[in-house]
Amino acid sequence: MENVIINVFNIVGTPFGVEADDGQKVFNLVHKAFSEKKKVILSFLNIEILTTAFLNTAVGQLYKDFTEAEIKGNLEVKDITNPGAVALKRVVDTAKLYYKDPGAMEKSINEILD
Amino acid sequence: MELSTLSSIRNTTTSYQQLASLYKQHSDDLFDNVHIEIKGWFSANMASALGAVLDKLTEGLNSIVFTHIDSGIQQILRKNDFLTYYGYSRAVDNHSTTIRYMKLKPTDGKFFSQYVTTELLNRSELPKISAALKEKMTEAIYEIFVNAQIHSKTSYIYTCGQFYPSKNRIEFTITDTGIGFKTKINERFGKNLSAVQAIKWAVQDRNTTKIGVTGGIGLPILREFIVRNKGLMQIVSDDGFYEYSHLGEKEYTMSAKFPGTVVNLQFCTDDHASYLLASEVNVNNIF
């Protein structure tokens, strides 16, 4: 399978990977590459600040359309800052749970009302 | 002429209450003059919340008239640009302790990046703050800004901050005039949470109102950082007040509703914790 390098800085245009809309642009490209059966290397070179909002849309929502095995086998990140990697890991762990249990939000609302 | 007095505005429940009451007092005014005096003390970062309230009042084509502002307060609110929005000239900040008041559209993310870079990241006169801490503070501020962008449906986002070098503290406040936590969550789930319940739900890990996209991590991460930093986070939305710090939680229901959401962050700047080493993640084991 051929590798595609997606350069986040080139998509965002600044060292700040922070806005959800910019994350959506990254997601669209990764999604397109996966759909074409390509492996993706997501490069965060020169990205200094990342928010979970950006990472949720860029990566988290991949778990809606692809299996964990597909993502693990076909997506690689590189040149990400340590805080960025920590945030991404948390986004990924949350996404796996979110898409497995779509009713979890409703349950948590009911808990706070009890 | 009904004069509204703001007295000793700090980051306290009574201060937020005063701002919410100011809005309540004048929210039905139309083509009127809103006369305001500011006395005693005014924490500069609270210009963010005041600016939001005053803009809501000008939606009724009311004019804001400051009948009196104590001279010390006037000086700081001219230094941070707040009063330049109300016909005052700008004052020079010789001590470099202000973080400018700014009013942005939710789509102005790139301007906000410039603002954060200029006002926080590239401030060479703040040698005590470690690079790691600056980065964590910036992340925190962005999480709040982006939350307002995504969730609030606000017309503008108001930001302002202040350095307190002698107290080793930075206060930074982001305010919007959007729908607030309560309406957002109750509309999404068809429930009837109070404002305090809604805020408390939103700060819990993995809780989100987003549909089809994951979320609910920004505020919990911020809470964890605040605890390690021994800082403080306050959220005021509708009539709810919520505060979180390493000392625990506080909540309060105000007698008036704030017309939007205020998030106030307080950071300790003499924190030399190594945020990088404490949380290493193997990039080959993320997915």
Image (tube, coloured by chain):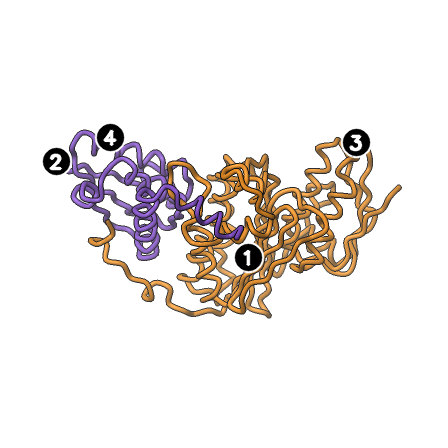
Chain colours: A purple, B orange
The residue where tag 2 is placed is A2
Q: Amino acid at mark 3?
A: Leu
Disc 1, SS = strand
Of badges 2 and 4, nearer the viewer stands 4
User: Is A11 located above or below residue B257 in the figure?
Assistant: above
Q: Amino acid at mark 2?
A: Glu
Looking at the rendered structure, whether the residues under marks 2 and 1 are on a common chain is answered as no
The residue where tag 3 is placed is B30
Of badges 2 and 3, nearer the viewer stands 3
Which quarter of the rendering shows the N terminus of chain B? top right
Q: Nearer the viewer, residue B67 or B176?
A: B176
Q: Chain of mark 1?
A: B
Which residue is at 53% across, 38% downward? B190
User: Is B100 located above or below residue B54 in the figure?
Assistant: below
Q: Amino acid at mark 4?
A: Lys
CB of mark 2 within 8 Å of CB of mark 4?
no
Marks 4 and 1, how far apart in space? 39 Å
Which residue is at 78% across, 40% downward? B26
The residue where tag 4 is placed is A32
Which quadrant holds residue B183?
top right
Q: Nearer the viewer, residue B228 or A113?
A: A113
